[in-house]
Image: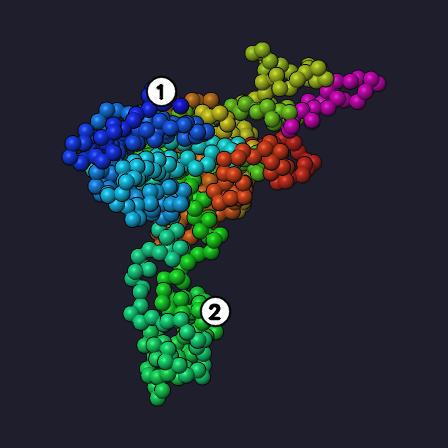
Amino acid sequence: MRPIYSLALTLLLAAPLSLPASAAEPDAPGALITRAEAIRMAVQNRLAGKFTVTTEHNKDEKGALVEYYSVPDQKLLWVDQNGLTDRGKAVIAEIKEADDYGLRAADYEMPDMAGFSLDAANATEQLADAEIKISYAVLDYTYDARGGRIEPQRISKNLDPTLALPDPLQVIESIAFRSDPAAYLRSFQPQQPQFDLLRKKLIALRGGGDSAEAEKPEVKIPDGPLLKLGIVDPQVALLRTRLDVPEGQNPHLYDEAVLEAVRQFQVDHNTAPDGVVGSGTRRLLNQPHLRNMGSPAQINAILINMERWRWLPHDLGAFYVNVNIPEFTLRVVKEDETIHTARVVVGKTDTQTPIFSNEMKTVVFGPYWNVPTSIKVEEIRPYVRQNGGFFFGGGWNTSVFQRHNLRIKYGGREVDPASLDWNRVDIRNLHLYQPPGPGNVLGQVKFMFPNKHDVYMHDTPQKHLFAKQVRAESHGCMRVQNPDQLATVIMSHDKGWSQARTLSAFENSYDQHVALNGNIPVHITYFTLRVNEDGSITTFNDLYGHDGRMSAALFGGRNRFTEPSEDEFLTQSISQRPPRRGGNPIADMISGF
């Protein structure tokens, strides 16, 4: 909790306010204070009550409200001496629409003003309660809108976005002077076009949206008996009118013409064409937009992917690189337009590519490959074997290093692997690397955006992997198809390089590090669903199982703030880990980096 919040709480708790005796009937003749002043004092008294909240976020929220309302003559935000103000009503109305934005309106406690009367003995207390509840709802809503509902790292250690959570005091101070507080609340929602498409699709799948109003039929079929071929009932006449079927000799008779019209209606509205009008068909006849309603699984998939947009920066950047892991695709975006697309190879299920945002700072042409510790231990050391025994001269078979042009440095000096006693050497303490060249596992270029996960984008000599539909083959880094094209786009944008200059560096350089003039945002994402411009949906496989974990956190199955145990992490990894195979260790290593 911020120190200023703590100080405000201490002062307020140490000296709770009390209303003057003459304030029992504020605004009455002879009263010492106005009703508005009495409400403000009641708010302060309530906030000075026992501090029972437990989470750091809740402490910050209460501290912010204490600090705001403790200022002398501080104006009330949502109520006045006459009840709820227009600002208060606008904020309540906006928060009640939270479900349309992928949140839950039920999560935000609102005051119950039904039957409120200014003449009631507890009117001042009711208004103070309303003021506090709305203020808390505003803080909770803005926190959730920016991704505060769940902690990604508690779902998986590989979900590592940097959340831009709002400061409660800044929120409450800012909304105090906004002319449109509802619009201010909406500004905390992701502003990207895809989020808006997801939002509109969510509304449609729940049976709402513009189509709900546009498709209201003039004639409605009330509840009644089952209508089917041969039935005579007054409702059949309504059915004829609703479906534009001529009256015929008997408008109340369900004849072949009505049967055909009902079947066609059922086909058009995605239901079984049995020609029988029961409760389901009646509902569609009266509310035809419900044909677009989605299943709970579809709606949950939309909600999960909306939540992921909250993990990204509010401003993605005018020029940025995005890799969407389940799609195995890289995009370069400039001014909201995709200007370059490429296939990528991403991490295997047991060596996942992490989800995070950072900034590209350097492009390296003709890079060295510094072998990671995990590969040194798991993929190289097991294949360094002793040659025979005492009678065969001993020594070590280190041909794995020569075959794949791997070098060793120790203490800054080049070391011959055959000269080492591998029984006594810890390979983790050796610097293993592969110099630039045709066989280098990083290919001819790598794109660096320094991060704690030590992953980056790079070329690869294993071009055949890009032909696969599922391209989860690496140890976590992202291999890019046609990296020369990506380099051309980046170097042209940042350095003003011509295509010829970039291709020359790509073909001829040896460990050439080019620092970028301006850092380029890189967003590694995990979207398993996209809404297209025509309203259709494209889905991608949940490669790493993050959808299931997010579903449990958002919709139940466990407390949404409970951190999975290490055993759960281990079980998830082990269950998906492919069996070890024999064969060429370095070929396997290269295909997995």
Please identify the quadrant where the C terminus is shown: top right
The magenta span reads: 378-399
Residue drawn 75% across the image and 18% down it? 395
Determine whether the residue tagged by mark 1 lies in a helix, strand or loop.
helix
Q: Are marks 1 and 2 in contact (CB under 8 Å)?
A: no
Residue drawn 44% across the image and 32% down it? 161
Would you say residue 384 sits in the magenta stretch? yes
Residue reaching furthest to the bottom: 249
Question: Which amino acid is tagged 2?
Answer: Ala
Q: Position of residue 274 (x, y in %)?
A: 48, 74
522, 553: nearer the viewer: 553
Q: Position of residue 465 (x, y in %)?
A: 54, 41
- Residue 272's disc is 2
Q: Earlier in the sequence, mark 1 or mark 2?
A: 1
Determine whether the residue tagged by mark 2 lies in a helix, strand or loop.
loop
Q: Which residue is mark 1?
A: 14
Residue 139: quarter of image: top left
Q: With 463 as the anchor, is 68 left or right in this view? A: left
Residue 118 versus residue 452 in the image, above or below: below
Asked whether residue 30 is in view, the answer is yes
